[in-house]
Amino acid sequence: MKNKSKIDTKCVHGYDYRESTGAVSVPIYQSATFRHDSLDEGTGYSYSRLQNPTRQALEETMAALEGGADAIAFGTGLAAMTVLFECCLSPDDHIIATEDLYGGSIRLLRTIVQNNGVQVDFVDTSDIGAVDRAIKKNTKAVFVETPTNPMMSVTAISSVAQLTKKHGLKLIVDNTFLTPYFLQPLALGADIVVHSGTKFLGGHNDTLAGFLVLRDTNDAERMRYAAKTIGACLSPFDSWLLLRGIKTLAIRMERIQGNALEIAKFLAGHKRVSRVNYVGLPQCKGHDIINKEASGYGGMISFEVDSHKTVRSLLEKVELISFAESLGGVETLITFPSTQTHADVPEAERERRGITDRLMRLSVGIENISDLIEDLKRALE
């Protein structure tokens, strides 16, 4: 029955958990090791780096939400990506990645991955022709983030999937922004989905987590082996926090999206705002693709103001909205990508991509929309 349930029901009942006490909430199995009754008898658990009952419930939930064969939980999103690239890529291999990625992903690819002898090309994956032209004989994978961070560029996953299948490549999609509630990349042809669970999945800015969700059981087996070897597993307590957060994912995402659309409209009409990037606006370049491939627009906005002076003034004057890194929580956060999320990207490259000293990123929360707009209106005066 649960496999046939709607996505919002799966958020609450994603795992098939039964516990002898009848507890509705999955217990936190805060144990590093598990006792065996004899040489030939065990419980299915041995050591929490390999597996833990609380983490297993979370992984089963994520696999159900994304429609994957398996899901693996990690301490952070970057830990998940490190295991992914370790398993998918070898020296002299080549990977194509979206050029407008989260700064931490760019740093990982340009340092750790390239230092391991892998060739990395960053391209505009919203341009299918550019992706096709970038494919080489040694290309092994295409890594897509959509919508991108922070410019909200949209890639047609189904179109890229046709290319990757034609060339025998893995298609990896970072689904952090839209979450499985609004977008399911595996159903569109992706092979692997990456999440920073720290963001909308956890939803409360109180823990770090990451996920890999795999379509193929062979991929899952290889990555589980690497995960237990590297040891970047999610703790039992953090697994429980993610389970609790996911229970309200559907209602949070609906509220966040409603607020984001109203804020995007407000910003688009403000005299100090020169550009608004939000995939829910009809004028957004990727709006039609989102309408075709996703069921919602999410809560991430970036916008450019008229001067750096306005940036400083806005960041100093907001009161309800917090000037902070990260995203995806119930609280609305505003970020300055040039010196925060994308500080490690060279200035010339940032400017070329539109990440100027006038660009800000907004992660919309669940507060009353009137209060949020009033805070922005006052701070933009």
Image (tube, rainbow, N blue to C red):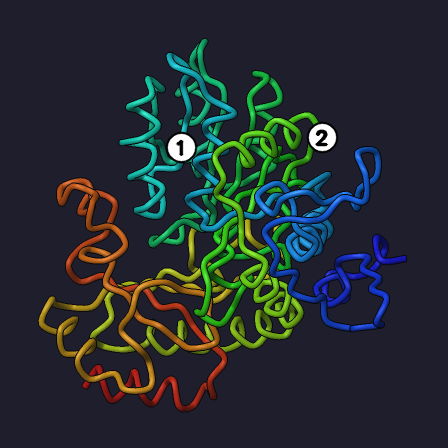
Q: Is residue 356 left or right of residue 153?
A: left
Which residue is nearer to you in this view: 130 or 260? 260
Question: Residue at 33% across / 21% down in the picture?
Answer: 116
- x and y percent of residue 316 in the render? 17, 80
For numbered disc 1, what is the local secondary structure? strand
Q: Is residue 332 left or right of residue 325?
A: right
Q: Single out the residue that lies furthest toward the front.
A: 38
- Say which residue label 1 marks: 97
Query: Mark 2 Cα within 10 Å, few/some/many (few <14, many 20+)?
Result: few
- Say which residue label 2 marks: 217
- Tell me the quadrant of the picture where the N terminus can be found: bottom right
Question: Residue at 18% across / 55% down in the picture?
Answer: 356
Which residue is nearer to you in this view: 166 or 19? 19
For numbered disc 2, what is the local secondary structure? helix
- On screen, residue 138 above or below 354: above
- x and y percent of residue 357 in the render? 15, 59
Which numbered tag is attached to residue 264?
none
- On screen, residue 363 above or below 125: below
Question: Residue at 72% across / 50% down in the picture?
Answer: 60
- x and y percent of residue 35 in the render? 72, 48
